[in-house]
Image (cartoon, rainbow, N blue to C red):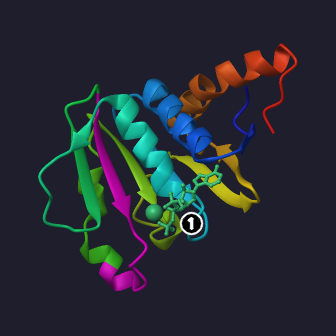
Amino acid sequence: MDSAQVLHLTLDGPEATRALGAQLAAAAEPGDAICLVGPLGAGKTTLVDGCARAMGAAPARSPTFVLAHRYDGGRLRIWHLDLYRLDDPAQVADLDLAQYFERSAVTLVEWADRAPHELPADALRIVLEVAPPGRRATIQASGPASQALLERLAAPHRRSEAAGMTTA
Ligand SMILES: Nc1ncnc2c1ncn2[C@@H]1O[C@H](COP(=O)(O)OP(=O)(O)OP(=O)(O)O)[C@@H](O)[C@H]1O
Ligand SMILES: [Mg+2]
């Protein structure tokens, strides 16, 4: 797969969004960053929930920064950032978002487009669109780690395409 490759998926309902989260949990390696982009109600939190459950991780003691949630006890620590309330670039810079991209964790960021300069350059980008009655996901990589993650994530889908099932 070359770096321009895109994975398109149709998510028929919330369970399909959770299943994509579970596939991410299985495919993620320590240090992976995942940007979630899409309008209100697109399914970003549902995807994180599916990822945390499949990872076997539970919410940890609330960190001081209310926009960051930590899930521990699973195969990998999960950081879940939700940047929805950030609209002032100066505020974004003050938050030191880099601290949430630990080498030992996987970090998922809702409303990632609110802090384009503070997030890792190499991150998997998942764009969720509302496509009634379900959602559409467009998944792309932007560097070597996210490309490797995309390939691990895409492998089962490519196999089902080869078997005659559709992914989009
Ligand atoms: N594939 C899907 N098809 C239909 N409904 C879905 C799908 N995935 C999630 N939903 C539903 O969409 C609603 C919104 O989901 P969710 O809260 O995850 O969105 P969000 O992107 O996090 O929203 P926000 O921007 O407000 O944080 C929920 O009711 C959820 O069950
Ligand atoms: Mg949300």
Residue 71's spot in the image, x, y percent?
Answer: 24, 43
Q: Is mark 1 within 8 Å of ligand 1?
A: yes
Q: Which residues are magenta?
A: 76-91
Quadrant that contains the N terminus: top right
- Identity of the residue drawn at 49% across and 66% down: 111
Where is the C terminus found, in terms of image quarters?
top right
Q: Which residue appears at 22% of the width and 68% of the height?
A: 66
Q: Is residue 5 left or right of residue 165?
A: left
Return the residue at label 1.
41
* Residue at 50% from the left image edge and 53% from the top image edge: 35
Instruction: Inspect the magenta stretch and tell me whether residue 29 lies in it.
Output: no
Task: State which quadrant residue 118 falls in.
Answer: bottom left
83 left or right of 156 in image: left
Residue lying farthest right? 164
With respect to residue 150, does 10 lie above or below? below
Dot 1 crowding, Cα within 10 Å, few <14, some 14–19, many 20+: few
Residue 88 rendering spot, x and y as whole percentages: 39, 86
Residue 156 shown left or right of residue 77 in the figure: right
